[in-house]
């Protein structure tokens, strides 16, 4: 049981840590460095860089979620059953669902919109329908990433207490 619990905890830490590192370090650095280097279309380049980082991390989050679910299931089958198994599995499923929706549906909408715009959305006038839609999709993506972050923090507390 120790091994299953350890693997699940490691997957959880990678998922939570990755989300924090992306949001607190990778995104701001991408935009700051491209602007400071005075590259042509710095926001477009930074957005492309961060978008690819996020796309790749989404695959990591899918793997982490699968490992967590399989570990919980293994612990349930082999015993002793984790406390509040159903609730914990539900949190992981919700975390995975939010990540999948952000990584598949929202990301595809953002990519389509970016192709349509052909430039950085911030280069469009304030009231432009495409800029407004990009802002909405960006906010939705950010909010969806909060689901695994908050769910993961809750699961981390549970693991520490158990």
Image (cartoon, rainbow, N blue to C red):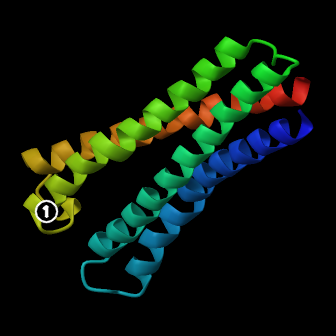
Report the number of numbered marks.
1
Q: Position of residue 158 (x, y in %)?
A: 80, 24
- In the picture, which quadrant includes the N terminus? top right
Q: Residue furthest front?
A: 78
Tell me: 131 left or right of 36. Answer: left
Q: Position of residue 8 (x, y in %)?
A: 75, 39
Closer-to-camera residue (154/74): 74
**Residue 76 in sight from this viewpoint:** yes
Q: Position of residue 111 (x, y in %)?
A: 22, 56
Q: Position of residue 65 (x, y in %)?
A: 59, 39
Closer-to-camera residue (134/5): 5
Residue at the image position 89 percent from the left and 24 percent from the top: 161
Residue at the image position 34 percent from the left and 65 percent from the top: 47
Q: Quadrant of residue 141?
A: top left
Q: Is residue 145 above or below residue 53?
A: above
Dot 1 falls on a residue whose secondary structure is: helix
Q: Is residue 95 above or below residue 15?
A: above
Q: Is residue 107 above or below residue 43?
A: above
Residue at the image position 44 percent from the left and 33 percent from the top: 98
* Residue denoted by label 1: 115
């Amino acid at each position: 049981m120790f091994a299953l619990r350890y693997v699940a905890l490691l997957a959880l830490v990678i998922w939570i840590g990755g989300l924090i590192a992306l949001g607190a370090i990778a995104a701001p650095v991408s935009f700051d460095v491209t602007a400071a280097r005075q590259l042509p279309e710095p926001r477009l380049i930074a957005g492309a860089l961060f978008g690819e980082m996020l796309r790749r991390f989404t695959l990591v989050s899918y793997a982490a979620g699968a490992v967590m679910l399989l570990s919980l299931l293994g612990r349930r089958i082999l015993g002793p059953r984790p406390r509040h198994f159903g609730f914990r599995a539900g949190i992981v499923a919700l975390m995975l669902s939010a990540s999948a929706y952000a990584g598949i549906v929202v990301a595809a909408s953002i990519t389509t919109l970016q192709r349509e715009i052909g430039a950085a959305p911030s280069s469009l006038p304030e009231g432009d329908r495409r800029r407004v839609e990009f802002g909405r999709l960006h906010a939705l993506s950010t909010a969806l990433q909060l689901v695994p972050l908050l769910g993961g923090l809750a699961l981390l507390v549970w693991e520490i207490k158990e």
